[in-house]
Every structure is written in structure tokens, then in C-alpha cells.
Image (tube, helix red, strand yellow):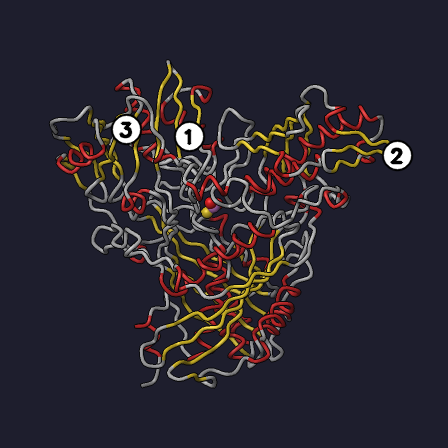
């Protein structure tokens, strides 16, 4: 039986709070953790198969054109040059890439061939030796050198911003630049493909199996039912594995041709080239306010880039329309069509860079108006969504700001260069955190055996986020079991289709489908107990109903199964759903070298129900660490001649690690959001990055008086602003 729920109305019942097991929300360790730390959890690149051959991708050496001729190399099993392989990865969330023209090359480093050999070393040597002759075209690679498109549906304005700017007591009008960013997941993209008759099984690293299966079937020209994907463990995605990429299709084509399993693993530089990047952005922010710091105008213009036919464009201004109120508003979104690598969703697409820049602009306005930055934000929080008048599903920005100010010791903040410790200027910065929230259709199956063990099955993925654990906790809580009696099986398209991991929607979407499946089983248990499901208490493998108490094993005499099916409904549109928070940073800036050291950070977040306080906290720590990267170190540099990525490994692309990351504190506000269904939990994965970099940049200004508007704020840029 399937329990179906379309979330058309708020669910204020808080059924989950009435459950008795007491495991949901607890900061328990990852249930698959020991597999990971002992190395028994295998990732796609670890997988092997009897008779497996090795494929290595060959990359285009020109930014645009076509392959005219591919040479021969001795000692290989195959050199595959197949247009299906050139199918672009999905650029955004669950969107399919357009088919590439015959052998069309769109960017430097695109996969043009696969060399297959008996050994990895043999394939690598042959790929290196392979000669490819191209017919090359001249194409633009600089977003500032082309006339951008202005997609009609992405522009909006109300009132008269120019007039508001002219009349205002205080204004800000500045331009910021953020570079291209890499997802930089630890696990490289990898696939092992193996055919049995007309069906292919691909062991892969993917975030969303359901849509990836459609994309692979489509690329190969076969039926969805002929493709099985397995991704039980995924070593991070950060957007780069939302859709398919060259490795899985190439491995499938080669495996079919050779009649044996083929493994394709990208090298680290290949991951940088072939996984989509976050577009660089140029953002102009205009703000105007009166003498009390009340905003009259908000303008946010963004220029981003992507390949000519790509659908996705970085939604920079996504949160701007509803975060603060102002009568006069203007949003401008421009897309430059250029031939850098494909741009797509990376770590909180939109807000990561949009909120960061906007929150820097607000800091500048606070400065201009002589108003405390926390106070300025508090004075401009809307009651309902500006423009539409829709209510917010919940709204915790003000509380997050007040609570954070208290915890962080904001009252001790001084003016720039007032706090000096040796050769270091020390300062504090604040920024708001905001991220849109949504649900995605999800299904799950749960089985309860007479032995009292539950099994959760769904094609959901755990990309390092803690999905195994929270789904286990949801089942344990609702079925009254110790978490040790729950087995969670994920990452297999033979299981019911879930949301997949992306856009912070995974936990709430797949979690609700598991909850619904468990309620279905609770119904069956209640029937055997002779009571209503709502009156049933399940705890420690015992069922209780009034004064009737039975061991679960005595009533579950044959396996009970339940299916859950969640669909987003009217609450997606009837209210504005978002998660909220505040970021705080204290930094020291060296007065001679311009080096910034982040000393401590705090994030205060509200995301509805927290399903596991440990994995949730880890998500936020990760996001805040990305914030340090965005503010101080991360930049994908493109060669101005051909657009190719210069910083294409982890030595050149600087992700903060270890000594770069100071003590960080995460605090969750208690919240239930009824508009997202019975779990009352919203997405959290990406909230921690949205605005984190702004807290660091604003702290740099508070420390030394320098504003860096071209990210990252490397020492050379800070030194340029410091008086000798
Ligand atoms: Mo996320 S960038 O939707 O994986």
C-alpha cells in the first residue's frame, strides 16, 4: 500500500514530536560511518569487475570547432569517438543538456574521445599519444567582450529606483566581481559500466539517480528501463554530479562495443574542466535609505555567463526580491554567451554569490548612514513577501540576528583600525543568511520484519550529507525501534525514485517519503492492535495502545511493507518558503602583509526541524568553510586567449582547509515549518554558505577599513587599500 501526500496545506500536527522513541534530531553518529573510516565503503572509482578494461578521456585542445581527424595509437582496445559521448552534462538542477551537434566542441577541455586499454597506465599513455586534428572556430571567451542577453522573464522592477537614489539621505552604488568557482568534490567523477544483454548497469558518482537515468538512456538512445544506476556512496557533489557527465556515457558505449566492463575515472584536472563551474558574476548593487536607515530603493544587476545553448544561468538575485523591503526596486539579469566551460549549479547556486555581495553592499550602506549593521538589517525586514504580499512560511531572520549578536559579543565591536594587536588589525563582520526552500517528488519503501528489523529502500543518495543516518532516524522514530534495528539502502535505481541530493531539498523530500511509508506500516500495526494509528505508541520494539502492550514481534508475524510518496503541492506557491540565519566572523588583518586570518565564526540558522544535530551542524560548518574560500582564496582563473581553466587542480584552486579554518560555532534556532509537510523540516545543506563570505569581508573592513569588491580578498588587494 502506498501512502501519498501532496503538500497542499500546512501540517501543524507535529506528529513527529508525539513519537516516543526519541531518536529523531539526536546528534547520533553516521550509521555508515565505520564503513567510510575503515575503507570498506567503496566509491565508483574503487569498483572493479571481472575482465574490466580502462578508459581514459581525451580532451579538446581548442575552445570551439570540430574534430577533423583522430589518429591511430597502437596497443589499445579501442579509440571511441562517438557523438553521444559529447552530450553535455545537465547544466542545472535536473535539466537535460541539449544534444551537441556532430562532433561539436564548445569549450577547451571538453571530452572528444575515449581511449580504452587493458590497463589504466596503457590507456593514459595512449590518450597522451593520440593525435587529434581539429577545425577550429574563433569564439568569444570573455564575458565583458560580448553583448549579453537579457532574458525577459528574469528582469523585474517596480517604482522608480533612479528617483529614489536621487532623493535618498544615503546611497550605495558599487560593482562587485566574483570569479568562477569549482564544486571541488573530493571524489572524482567515475563510472564502471557493464552490459547484460540490452541492459547496462553503471556504478557511478551521481547526486540524482532518477533524472540521471533518464539522461543516460536518452544519450544512449535506449529505454530508461534498460539502465540501472548504482551510487551507494558518493564522495561529495556540490552540484557537479547533479546531472550526467562524459564518464558514464563513455563507459557505457565502450563497454557495449567491447563486450566487457569498462571503467572511466576522471583525473583531477579533468574534473575541473568537465564538471560545470559556477559562473563568474559581475554585480552592481544600488541601495538607498533615509536618515533612519529605512530602505527606499534596492537595485541588483547581475552579469553571468554560459555556453551559447545552455539553459542554466546563475540565479544571482534569487533571494533579493524577498529578503528586504523597499518601495523602489530593480532586478537586472544578463547572460553573456561565451565559450568558457559549461556553467551550472555549484554549492547554493544564486544565493552563495548573490547574498554574499548584497550583504557586503548593506554593510557599506550601514557605514554611510552611521547605523549599526545589525540594526540596519532589523529595520528593513518585511512582514510579508514584498511585491506579492504572500506570507512567509516562517521567518527567523530577526531572531537569528539578535541571537547571534548576543552569542558572538557584537557589542564589543569597534571602528576600523581601533582594535590593534601587535601587527594585526582585528574586526568583526555580520551578514544575513537566506536560501529558498522547496520539496521534490520522492518515493520510498519501508519493510518491517517479524524479527523487528526495518529496511528503508529508496534511490536517494547520500553525498556525504548524512542521508543514511537521518532516514534511519525517521524510520526508527516512527516505528519505535533502536536505530541499530534499521537498515537503510540507498543509491540504486531499482529502489523507488526519490528527489536525489541537490538544492537542499533532499532531507525534507526523501525524509517525508520515508515517514509516509512508516505511517503506512503504523496503520497496519494499529489495525492488529485494534486501535487508531494516532493512538498507537511504538517504542523500543513495543506497541502500546491504551493499556494494551505487545512486543512488536508478536504482532508482526510476517513482513509488513509500506510505500511513501511525497509530492510538493500548493504550499510551494501559497507562501514564500525560505530558510534564514546570520553569519558572524572575527578576522585579523596584517597591517604589513595584508594577510587575513579568520579567528572565529558563528552561524545561527533556522531550517525548521533539525533531523540530526550532528550531521546538520557538519553541513553548516562546511558551508561556512566555503564562505571563507569565497571571501579569501577560491578563484577559477580562465586564460583570456581560449577560456581554459588555469587553476585546475587542488594545489592551484585554493579550498580552505585545516589551518585556514578557525574555531566555528553553529547554533540552531528552534523552529517547525508546517508548510513543508509533517516533518516540518526544511533544507539546510546550502544555507551555511549563503552570506558566510560577506561576514568575513565585512569583518576585514571593520578591521582595517579596506573594502575588497573583487573576490577573493587576497593580500595584494588588501595591501593596495592600506595606507603605508
Ligand atoms: Mo546543489 S549545487 O543543487 O548540488
Q: Is residue 457 above or below residue 666?
A: above
Question: For mark 1, does the 10 Å Cα neighbourhood hold few (<14), some (14 to 19), or many (20 or more) residues?
Answer: many
Query: What residue would you read off at disc 3?
Result: 83
Mark 1 CB in 8 Å range of ligand 1?
no
- Who is closer to the viewer here, 174 or 489? 489
Q: Where is residue 265 in the image (x, y as percent from the top left)?
A: 30, 36
For residue 723, above or below residue 35:
below
Q: Which of marks 2 and 3 is nearer the N terminus?
A: 3
Image mark for residue 341: none
Q: Is mark 3 on a helix, strand or loop?
A: helix
Q: Position of residue 689 (x, y in %)?
A: 49, 57
Name the residue nearer the viewer: 590 or 434: 590
Residues at badges 2 and 1 in contact (C-beta under 8 Å)? no
Residue 594 as seen in the image, left or right of residue 522: left
Choose between 217 and 606: the one closer to the eye: 606
Q: How crowded is mark 2: few (under 14 residues within 10 Å), some or many (20 or more)?
A: few
Instruction: Identify the residue under disc 1.
Output: 215
Q: Is residue 499 left or right of residue 51?
A: right
Label 3 CA crowd tier, 10 Å (few <14, some 14–19, many 20+): some
Q: Give the residue at mark 2.
A: 547
Q: Position of residue 30 (x, y in %)?
A: 54, 44
Gap between marks 2 and 1 measured at Cα: 54 Å
Amino acid at each position: 500500500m502506498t501512502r501519498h501526500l501532496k503538500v497542499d496545506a500546512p501540517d501543524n500536527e507535529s506528529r513527529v514530536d508525539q513519537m516516543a522513541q526519541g531518536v529523531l534530531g539526536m546528534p547520533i553518529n553516521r550509521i555508515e560511518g565505520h564503513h567510510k573510516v575503515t575503507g570498506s565503503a567503496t566509491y565508483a572509482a574503487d569498483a572493479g569487475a571481472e575482465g574490466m578494461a580502462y578508459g581514459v578521456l581525451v580532451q579538446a585542445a581548442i575552445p570551439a570547432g570540430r574534430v577533423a581527424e583522430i589518429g591511430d595509437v597502437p596497443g589499445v582496445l579501442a579509440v571511441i569517438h562517438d557523438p553521444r559521448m559529447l552530450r553535455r552534462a545537465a547544466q542545472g538542477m535536473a535539466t537535460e543538456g541539449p544534444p551537441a551537434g556532430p562532433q561539436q566542441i564548445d569549450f577547451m577541455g571538453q571530452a572528444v574521445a575515449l581511449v580504452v586499454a587493458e590497463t589504466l597506465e596503457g590507456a593514459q599513455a595512449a590518450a597522451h599519444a593520440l593525435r587529434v586534428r581539429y577545425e577550429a572556430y574563433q569564439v568569444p571567451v570573455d564575458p565583458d567582450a560580448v553583448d549579453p542577453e537579457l532574458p525577459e522573464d528574469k528582469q523585474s522592477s517596480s517604482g522608480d529606483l533612479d528617483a529614489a537614489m536621487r532623493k535618498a539621505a544615503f546611497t550605495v552604488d558599487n560593482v562587485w566581481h566574483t570569479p568562477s568557482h569549482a564544486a571541488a568534490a573530493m571524489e572524482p567523477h567515475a563510472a564502471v559500466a557493464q552490459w547484460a544483454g540490452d541492459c547496462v548497469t553503471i556504478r557511478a558518482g551521481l547526486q540524482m539517480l532518477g533524472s540521471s537515468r533518464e539522461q543516460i538512456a536518452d544519450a544512449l538512445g535506449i529505454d530508461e528501463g534498460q539502465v540501472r544506476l548504482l551510487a551507494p556512496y558518493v564522495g561529495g557533489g556540490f552540484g557537479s554530479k547533479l546531472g550526467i557527465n562524459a564518464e558514464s556515457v563513455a563507459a557505457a558505449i565502450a563497454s557495449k562495443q567491447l563486450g566487457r566492463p569498462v571503467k572511466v575515472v576522471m583525473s583531477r584536472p579533468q574534473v575541473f574542466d568537465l564538471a560545470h563551474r559556477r559562473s563568474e558574476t559581475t554585480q552592481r548593487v544600488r541601495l538607498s535609505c533615509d536618515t533612519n536607515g529605512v530602505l527606499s530603493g534596492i537595485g541588483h544587476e547581475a552579469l553571468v555567463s554560459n555556453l551559447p545553448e545552455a539553459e542554466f544561468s546563475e540565479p544571482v538575485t534569487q533571494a533579493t526580491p524577498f529578503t528586504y523591503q523597499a518601495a523602489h526596486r530593480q532586478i537586472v539579469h544578463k547572460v553573456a554567451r561565451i565559450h568558457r566551460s559549461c556553467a551550472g549549479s555549484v554549492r547554493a547556486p544564486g544565493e552563495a554569490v548573490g547574498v554574499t555581495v548584497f550583504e557586503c553592499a548593506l554593510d557599506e550602506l550601514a557605514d554611510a548612514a552611521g547605523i549599526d549593521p545589525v540594526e540596519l538589517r532589523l529595520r528593513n525586514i518585511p512582514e510579508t513577501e514584498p511585491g506579492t504580499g504572500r506570507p512567509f512560511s516562517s521567518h527567523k531572520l530577526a531572531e537569528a540576528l539578535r541571537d547571534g549578536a548576543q552569542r558572538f559579543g557584537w557589542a564589543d565591536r569597534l571602528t576600523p583600525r581601533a582594535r590593534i594587536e601587535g601587527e594585526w588589525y582585528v574586526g568583526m563582520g555580520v551578514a544575513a543568511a537566506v536560501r529558498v526552500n522547496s520539496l521534490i517528488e520522492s518515493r520510498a519503501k519501508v519493510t518491517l520484519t517479524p524479527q523487528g528489523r526495518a529496511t528503508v529502500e529508496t534511490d536517494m543518495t547520500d553525498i556525504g550529507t548524512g542521508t543514511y543516518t537521518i532516514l534511519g532516524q525517521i524510520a526508527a522514530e516512527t516505528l519505535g525501534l533502536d536505530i541499530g534495528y534499521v537498515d537503510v539502502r540507498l543509491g540504486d535505481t531499482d529502489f523507488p525514485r526519490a528527489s536525489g541530493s541537490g538544492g537542499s531539498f533532499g532531507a525534507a523530500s526523501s525524509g517525508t517519503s520515508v515517514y509516509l511509508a512508516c505511517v503506512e506500516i503504523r496503520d497496519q500495526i494499529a489495525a492488529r492492535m485494534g486501535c487508531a494509528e494516532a493512538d498507537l505508541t511504538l517504542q523500543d520494539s513495543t506497541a502500546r495502545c491504551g493499556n494494551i502492550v505487545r512486543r512488536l514481534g508478536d504482532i508482526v508475524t510476517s513482513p509488513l511493507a509500506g510505500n511513501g510518496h511525497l509530492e510538493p503541492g500548493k504550499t510551494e506557491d501559497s507562501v514564500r518558503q525560505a530558510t534564514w540565519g546570520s553569519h558572524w566572523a572575527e578576522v585579523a588583518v596584517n597591517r604589513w602583509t595584508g594577510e587575513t586570518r579568520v579567528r572565529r565564526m558563528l552561524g545561527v540558522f533556522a531550517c525548521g526541524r533539525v533531523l540530526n544535530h550532528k550531521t546538520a551542524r557538519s553541513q553548516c560548518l562546511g558551508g561556512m568553510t566555503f564562505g571563507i574560500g569565497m571571501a579569501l582564496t577560491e578563484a577559477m582563473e580562465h586564460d583570456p586567449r581560449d577560456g581554459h581553466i588555469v587553476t585546475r587542480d587542488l594545489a592551484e584552486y585554493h579550498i580552505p582547509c585545516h589551518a585556514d579554518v578557525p574555531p566555528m560555532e553553529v547554533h540552531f534556532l528552534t523552529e517547525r515549518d508546517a508548510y513543508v509537510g509533517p516533518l516540518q523540516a526544511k533544507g539546510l545543506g546550502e544555507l551555511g554558505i549563503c552570506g558566510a563570505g560577506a561576514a568575513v569581508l565585512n569583518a576585514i573592513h571593520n578591521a582595517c577599513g579596506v573594502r575588497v569588491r573583487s573576490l577573493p580578498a587576497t593580500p595584494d588587494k588588501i595591501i593596495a587599500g592600506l595606507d603605508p
